[in-house]
Amino acid sequence: MALYKFKAADQNSVIFSEKIEAETESDVHNHIKARNLIPIEIKKVGILDFGSIVRSPSTTARSKECAVVAQQISFLIDAGMPITKCMELVMKKTRNKKLIKSFAFINSSILKGDSFFTALDASGAFPKFFVHMTQVGEQSGKLSYTMQKLNTYYLKEQKQKDALAAAMLYPSIVTVLMLCVITVALLFVVPNYSRMFEASGQALPLITQILIDVSNFFVNNSSYLLLFVILILLSVSLFLKTDRMKKTICYLKLQNPIYLKTTNLRFAQSTSLLLDSGLDVVASLEIAKQVLENSVLGLEIDNSISKIKSGSSLSQALKTVRYFDESLLSFIELGEETGRLAETIAKSAEFFESETEELITRVNKLIEPMITLILGTVLALVMLAIMLPTFYMANNF
């Protein structure tokens, strides 16, 4: 992903320039044409004009940091402080070194005459959704109100991430412990018992013989196995960076019920906030599509945007998106009928938030006993394989 700066003209021949993140220059052309603009000049921007700060291709601010920054800016603006003073105070409260450099760059850009939105976008320190919402708030004169909305949005997003992390914590810990126990048993415990069983000269049970053979394989080929694992990890990491694999991963994510429910939630939250800020439906979908960060879903939303431009309603256009829940479409249709689209979509976000929490809790309750059962079964088999010959030897003795 690179940063491009382009100049374009609208139907009234008004020329303006913007910066945008895109994979290729062709993507920038498509973006300009989608907005019914005439491209004049496109340049790839690599290094920012501020000391040695190089623009990072990924954002450095996490959801919690975005929420805190938005809240602080909102309070300071309400107190009557200019945006440059706001940035100075926010910078003093920040512990993230990368964000401190970004805030310094933003403040420097504003002092040079750039708008807050332009400086924020050029810094590359915040998500595109945060940047676009800032642009809307700045241009409408409601920056403080917009920051309050962003604070609420990112607090909810952080809550969702924490819930998912908590749901995965127990299975992850148990799985790692299980792998560690099995590895120690195969490399150190079983070889000692194996020598003792061989010295006794008695026939071993099938389960014990299988365990010893597996242990011998790991002990005799440990260096080759380690090299094989490293090569596999390197190959997978390189393969994951290909466009085809990225698209496949995006598709597989959409088959996950929790991810799908969370995606519907994020779409409802972001779209309602954008519409409430005064953006039209097409612009809101363009930005919401970037928030979802899924290329497969993004293509389907692009098709919906084309249909809306051709005269379709939002609810009709989104029916072609396979991954949106029927209840979400029903909320949108109701909002169009009542003329309260943003408010109704916000209500659907509350509905999906409740459903997502319930689904995570349900899945977590299902996974925990399953993981415990699998771990107990594996350990029981290992213990059985070791103890059976021991009992035979004790009886014979």
Image (tube, helix red, strand yellow):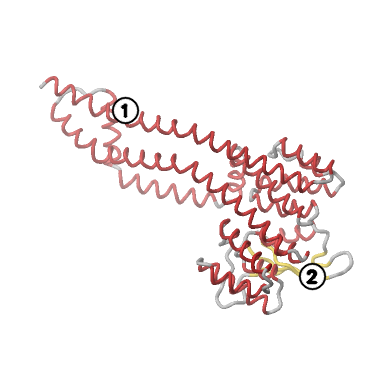
Look at mark 1 in the image and give the residue it sits on.
381
Query: Is any part of residue 325 visible from this angle?
Result: yes
Residue 100, given in percent of the width and then of the height, sits at: 54, 70
Q: Residue at x 68, y 74 (%)?
A: 82
Q: Residue at x 54, y 49 (%)?
A: 240
Vertical order, 176 against 7 (above or below): above
Tell which of 156 and 210 is nearer to you.
Answer: 156
Residue 336, given in percent of the width and then of the height, sits at: 83, 43
- Residue, far bottom: 112
> In what quadrant of the picture does the C terminus appear?
top left
Of the image marks 1 and 2, the number of the one nearer the N terminus:
2
Tell which of 73 and 227 is nearer to you.
Answer: 73
Could you tell me which secondary element the residue under label 2 belongs to? strand
Quarter location, residue 264 = top right
Give the number of callouts.
Answer: 2
Look at mark 2 in the image and give the residue it sits on.
16
Q: In the rendered view, does 6 fall on the left or right side of 380? A: right
